[in-house]
Amino acid sequence: MKAARPARQPQLSLGLSAPDLLRIHRAMRLTREIEQREIVLYRQNKITGGVYTGSGMEAVSVGSAWPLRKDDPVAASHRGIGVHVVKGLSPKTLLLQLLGRAEGLCRGKDNALHHGDLSCGLLGMISHLGANIPMAVGAALACRMQRADRVAMAWTGEGATSLGDFHEGLNCAAVWKLPFVLIIENNQWSYSTPTRLTYACKELADRAAAYGIPGKRVDGNDVLAVYAASKEAVDRARAGGGPSLIECWTMRMRGHAEHDPFEYVPREMLEEWKKKDPLDRFEAWLVGQGLANAAALEAVAEECRAEVVEASDYAEAAPFPDGRIAAEGVYAEPGKS
């Protein structure tokens, strides 16, 4: 019997090993399974308020966060489940938060992704995404003042680049040469407003030149392209080279939120982008590189689904917070951080 031939290694200069690539795949798959479960729970009226997913954008959140260290401060967007997964939050932790349970990171006082967890660098997300930028720039300034070699990263949408927060945050980061990376999730729709009505420049990455910093647009549905650009920017920032801007060209495959039927998006546009699904593309690449086969990929999917279902069952059975503690922990207490 002939010995099995070793898996062919990808010809890349990204410093990613075969196990690294498979872990990236698992993070993307787990992100999608968490969001699919979130949609089901919302349809069952078990999640109240808005549910915002990054369906079709997993390559952006996972690929951009992958070069970061656990202690690097991040301000993710409301479509950034992948950032939380890469940073180490479990499906159980995320679903406890999304279901508003007492064990959630916000102790049931919020059931969106507004939570923070400084043990892994997560800053509390701000719904008005433009405000994520100056917050993360402030974290980058703190890293500088502490003489720490940490890098701050923020994610925002293309619509928020029209706000003053974008200019003020990037200008400060550039002038002070702070260790900061901004990821623009350009999913082509600011709620229902298309990009042609949002900005006049050809690419949002072109705006970086006005601040004297590097700017790059990448295929946001190619996780390795996102990773490569992000790693370059993170390494540059960590070495003292200052901030960078990365525009990820992608498409959200569901409405602005789950209550939005997104009828304003042409159906042919959605069909076109279905063919560019980032998870399908990466899985096909892994198979082509000899790093996985269909059975192995399906096994990962089943494992992730089982993990998410178990986490969901636990979160659904967990208690809601006691109303008597509603006012606790709302404001910082003097002398405590």
Image (spheres, rainbow, N blue to C red):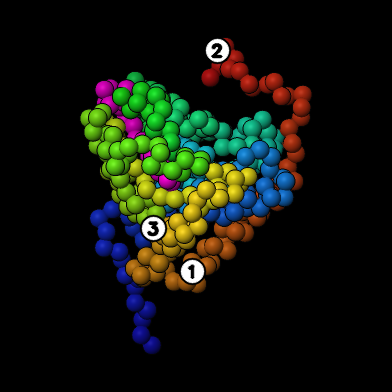
Q: Is residue 8 left or right of residue 155?
A: left
| Image mark for residue 267 | none
Residue that label 3 marks? 21
User: Percent position (x, y) of residue 111?
Assistant: 64, 36
Residue 46 shows in this picture = yes
Q: Is residue 99 magenta?
A: no
- Magenta extent: 172-188
Q: Which residue is mark 2?
A: 335
* Alpha carbons under labels 3 and 1: distance apart: 14 Å
Q: Between residues 326 and 48, which one lies in front from this camera angle?
A: 48
Which mark identifies residue 296?
Answer: 1
Quarter holding residue 327: top right
Q: Using a 10 Å C-alpha cutoff, classify the residue at mark 1 as few (fewer than 14 neighbours), some (14 to 19) or many (20 or more).
A: few
Callout 1 secondary element: helix
* Horizontal and vertical percent position of residue 215: 27, 39
Q: Amino acid at mark 3?
A: Leu
Q: Say which of marks 3 and 2 sits in front.
A: 3
Q: In the figure, is residue 223 to the left or right of 207?
A: right
Which residue is at 43% across, 33% downward?
Answer: 160
Residue for point 68% across, 43% down: 47
Seen from the viewer's position, the closer of residues 29 and 87 is: 29
Q: Tag 3's secondary structure?
A: helix
- Which badge, 3 or 2, comes first in the chain's sequence? 3
Specify the quadrant of the image occupied by residue 334: top right
Label 3–label 1 contact, CB within 8 A: no
> Tags 3 and 2 in contact by the CB under 8 Å rule?
no
Question: What's the residue at 56%, 58% (across, down)?
Answer: 304
Identity of the amino acid at label 1? Ala
Q: Position of residue 297 (x, y in %)?
A: 48, 66
Q: Is residue 185 magenta?
A: yes
